Image: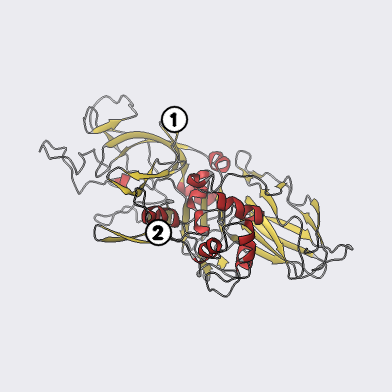
């Protein structure tokens, strides 16, 4: 292969850039996984992307429980099929994981299977890895068009105007609760990422695959029985009833009488504080009733907070015997808490643009939970910053036809461009943390990738926090293939 120097001039403005060297593993239960560590030693550019996850080698699948069939992501499916309690079953592998195992589970094994097409989609394993697509998933391959996406980190979410509200969390099978949440109004969050006029609804995902869909503009006023949880709100004000032994009063506002109308105007929130404290991060734990399966415990770092669409008082759980005192479980009440998605991973704004592909939130969602991030994607048009660069060979001559792939940290490839006859390239990207990966047959690049962060809008000053035309220069050299 030809020796090449990779020179990038990145016009990012107050940009942070470092080689990808250290980060915690994607899924919190596998932070010490030796196999993913070997993978990242061979492919350091994949760190913190969707490939840095159990789903690289393990498949999702369907399990029948109690006569019902449910789909699980790779993490859940592996634990369920392998068994949380002995005797353990067979560990499931996808084609790439099986090839890696058969080749000896080493760094050399990873390199030896680079030329294979482990998932039979006509793309070799190395080609897929460099494009940040799964080499063990036939439906995920280079060339697919990703939907516009923004990954909001905790700093950006906390920078949004916050809203506090006290509400009744009315559950069906567990205790009801009066609780105060602080968070960002979903309507404002969507406008911040550039909600497109054709958007009609959102689907909110948890990392275990649970999801709920809500209309953006429900009729006003809504008419029973077709009352919906409305994204934009506001919702009807709630009522407070004290002193009930089947209600958890985690927050006591000291209202003077039962049936008092709570003055807070209620909205759908992306909540991050509960009674003033950060939400406990969600995690998978063995089900106390069935140790052979996993359940989601915790609700954070973000929870979708749904007020009651039909305001009313609490009632006993459906699992309690009725006492016929007016507080028994009532199926006609609005049990809003069952639709309040815990550990929010992503918000899909629908419809997706024509020809774009979707993400799998049963795969890789834990990466976002661990890093306190939320992905918002679909029918959005976020503000962008222009990334520019230049590629030259070892003699300083421009190098054309080099493809530069841009991966959004925690997700896969979200953009790509190609250097022209002058060696220059450009790409417009929303705020976020990215990895850029150059590739061209016959060439190797050093370093293999660059990690960079594009800052977002500074909401406190209502201005973009970076000048768009300041350049950032970096020199890269290459070595011939041994």
Q: Residues within 10 Å of mark 1 (few under 14, many from 20)?
A: few
Q: How is the image coloured?
A: secondary structure
Query: Circle 1 — which element?
Result: loop
Of labels 1 and 2, the one closer to you: 2
Tell me: residue 176, above or below residue 103: above
How many discs appear? 2
Query: Circle 2 — which element?
Result: loop
Q: Which residue does the numbered mark 1 point to in the structure image? A: 276
Give left or right: position of 418 versus 240: right
Camera-nearest residue between 64 and 41: 41
Q: Residues within 10 Å of mark 2 (few under 14, many from 20)?
A: few
Q: Quadrant of the N terminus?
A: bottom right
Q: Quadrant of the C terminus?
A: bottom right
Q: Which mark is residue 56?
A: none
The residue located at (89%, 63%) in the rendering is: 395
Q: Position of residue 67 (x, y in %)?
A: 24, 61
Q: Position of residue 180 (x, y in %)?
A: 38, 34
Tell me: residue 233, above or below residue 406: above
Q: Position of residue 182 (x, y in %)?
A: 44, 36
Query: Residue 428: which quarter of the image?
Result: bottom right
Alpha carbon of mark 1 to alpha carbon of mark 2: how far? 45 Å
Q: Which residue does the numbered mark 2 point to in the structure image? A: 90
Query: Residue 311: which quarter of the image?
Result: top left
Camera-nearest residue between 380 and 328: 328
Q: Position of residue 295 (x, y in %)?
A: 35, 47
Camera-nearest residue between 44 and 395: 44
Query: Residue 148: which quarter of the image?
Result: bottom right
């Amino acid at each position: 292969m030809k020796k090449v120097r990779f020179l990038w001039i990145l016009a990012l403005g107050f940009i942070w850039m470092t080689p990808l060297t250290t980060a915690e593993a994607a899924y919190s239960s596998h932070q010490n996984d030796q196999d993913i560590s070997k993978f990242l030693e061979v492919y350091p550019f994949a760190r913190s992307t969707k490939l840095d996850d159990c789903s690289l080698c393990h498949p999702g699948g369907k399990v029948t429980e109690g006569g019902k069939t449910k789909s699980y992501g790779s993490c859940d499916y592996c634990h369920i099929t392998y068994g949380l309690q002995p005797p353990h079953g067979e560990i499931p592998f996808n084609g790439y994981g099986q090839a890696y195992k058969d080749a000896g589970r080493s760094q050399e094994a990873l390199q030896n299977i680079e030329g294979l097409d482990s998932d039979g989609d006509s793309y070799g394993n190395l080609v897929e890895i460099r494009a940040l697509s799964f080499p063990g998933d036939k439906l995920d391959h280079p060339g697919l068009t990703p939907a516009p996406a923004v990954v909001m980190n905790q700093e950006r979410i906390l920078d949004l105007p916050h809203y506090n509200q006290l509400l009744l969390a009315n559950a069906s099978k567990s205790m009801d609760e009066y609780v105060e949440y602080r968070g960002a109004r979903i309507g404002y969050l969507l406008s911040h990422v550039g909600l497109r006029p054709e958007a009609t609804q959102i689907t909110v995902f948890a990392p275990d695959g649970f999801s709920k869909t809500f209309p953006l503009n429900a009729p006003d006023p809504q008419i029973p029985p077709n009352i919906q949880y409305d994204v934009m709100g506001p919702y009807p004000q709630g009522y407070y009833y004290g002193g009930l032994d089947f209600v958890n009063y985690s927050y006591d506002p000291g209202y003077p009488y039962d049936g008092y109308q709570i003055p807070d105007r209620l909205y759908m929130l992306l909540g991050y504080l509960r009674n003033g404290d950060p939400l406990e991060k969600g995690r998978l734990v063995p089900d106390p009733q069935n140790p052979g399966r996993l359940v989601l415990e915790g609700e954070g770092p973000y929870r979708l907070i749904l007020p009651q669409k039909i305001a009313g008082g609490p009632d006993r759980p459906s699992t309690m015997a009725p006492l016929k005192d007016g507080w028994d479980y009532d199926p006609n009440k609005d049990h809003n808490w069952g639709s309040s998605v815990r550990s929010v991973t992503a918000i899909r704004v629908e419809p997706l643009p024509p020809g774009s592909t979707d993400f799998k939130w049963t795969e890789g969602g834990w990466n976002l939970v661990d890093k306190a991030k939320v992905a918002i994607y679909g029918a959005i048009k976020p503000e962008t910053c222009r990334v520019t660069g230049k590629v030259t060979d070892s003699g300083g001559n421009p190098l054309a036809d080099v493809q530069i792939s841009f991966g959004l940290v925690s997700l896969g490839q979200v953009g790509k461009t190609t250097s022209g006859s002058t060696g220059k390239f450009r790409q417009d990207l929303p705020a976020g943390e990215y990895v850029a990966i150059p590739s061209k047959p016959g060439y190797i690049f050093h370093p293999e990738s660059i990690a960079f962060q594009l800052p977002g809008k500074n909401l406190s000053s209502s201005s973009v926090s970076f000048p768009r035309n300041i350049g950032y220069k970096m020199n890269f050299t290459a070595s011939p293939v041994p």
